[in-house]
Image (tube, rainbow, N blue to C red):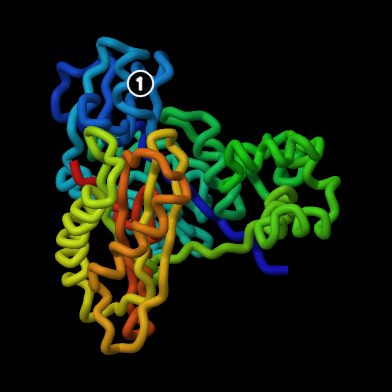
Amino acid sequence: MSDPRKIIHIDADSFYASVETRENPDLRGKPLAVGGRADRRGVIATANYEARTFGVHSAMASSRAMSLCPTLLILPPRFELYREISAQFHAIFRDYTDLIEPLSLDEAYLDVSGTDRCQGSATLVAREIRQRVPQELGLTVSAGIAPNKFLAKVASDWNKPDGLFTITPQQVADFVLELPVSKINGVGRVTAEKLRRLGVETCGDLQALPLETLVKRFGKYGRRLYDVARGVDERRVQSSRVRKSISVERTFVEDIDDMPAMVAAVDELLDELESRFSRISARYFPTKRVVKMKYNDFTQTTLEEGIGASGEAWNDRERFHRLVNTAWPRGARPVRLLGAGLRLQPLAADDLDQLSLFDETSGDGEPVSAPLD
């Protein structure tokens, strides 16, 4: 058998907020978040640990965060600064391996299986990186070390903040038995509830379910559940991937509930989408138009259509208008957010840069569906 892989997952601790504190030491010890304004339906991107003690967390509405912590200071994001510091993180990583897969500005996988640094020990590599980051950048990171990406990501969260945790190949079988299924990427509230109804709370419980049952209940994702419940994850660390989509979205200060207002909003989004797509149009071609709609009860729907022959313009606004007109009746409620985007295919096989439509972040850490304030 081949030697087990040595994967490190590095995750900066409350990255945006920590950068802001580094830049302004007077903020130290105060509850702090980075995100959108509460009076404009902003959302928290990250919160420091002082704010988290009040229950503030990422993806929470800024207004809700302020109600939980009235002294919370919410700063607007400075992505240019965060990107600059992220590049400095990666300069450190490259001293140990070229196999680096960024997940966002503050998070990455490193495959150090072939390194001869630190006596070839992944744990010692992670420990050295954790020493260098505070010394060179004035920030802290947490690290998880394991034979695969799934367990390395779980491990990096084990002793946060400023922590390190290693799962050796010999420990995998015992470790996953008591691991809550909520730690599995993709198991959100709905999937967790479905599993609970099957008597599943831990990966050990999940191991008792036959593969056929999981596939029947969860489709292709059932195969993934079956594997990771046993600590199996064959995904490789990929230093580059193909861009899949591009999009923009807007959250409104006040809900809109008539079609002329939605059409006008989509046209504004398309102006931005055209600008963004023009930067990559020499390398990608669009295959589908997509609209996303979130109602005032926070339910949402996404609708897409294929783009026809090469002579058809992807930015045909009438077609986007029809998508909005078709999507809105699905919820038939006032709308708080609209998004417009494109599914993409590369013009050449070596085009890189993964983006996933309407995901929280892209490969470079920016919101994929760029929020318009």
Q: Which residue is mark 1?
A: 64
Query: Where 71 falls versus 135 (above or below)?
Result: above
Crowd rating for badge 1 (residues with CA inside 10 Å; few <14, some 14–19, many 20+) = some
Determine the secondary structure under disc 1: helix
Q: Position of residue 66 (x, y in %)?
A: 30, 17
Where, quadrant-wise, is the N terminus in this rendering? bottom right
User: Residue 106: which quarter of the image?
Assistant: top left
The residue at 50%/64% (across/down) is 114
Total marks in image: 1
Q: Residue furthest top?
A: 70
Is 276 displayed left or right of 60 in the figure? left
Q: Position of residue 68 (x, y in %)?
A: 37, 14
Any part of residue 243 in sight: no
Q: Position of residue 287 (x, y in %)?
A: 37, 77
- Nearest to the observer: residue 370 or residue 340: 340
The residue at 35%/79% (across/down) is 346
- Nearest to the observer: residue 236 or residue 3: 236
Q: Position of residue 284 (x, y in %)?
A: 29, 78
Amino acid type assigned to the residue bearing label 1 in the image: Arg
The residue at 62%/40% (across/down) is 190
Where, quadrant-wise, is the C terminus in this rendering? top left
Query: Where 128 falls versus 22 (above or below)?
Result: below
The residue at 17%/72% (across/down) is 278
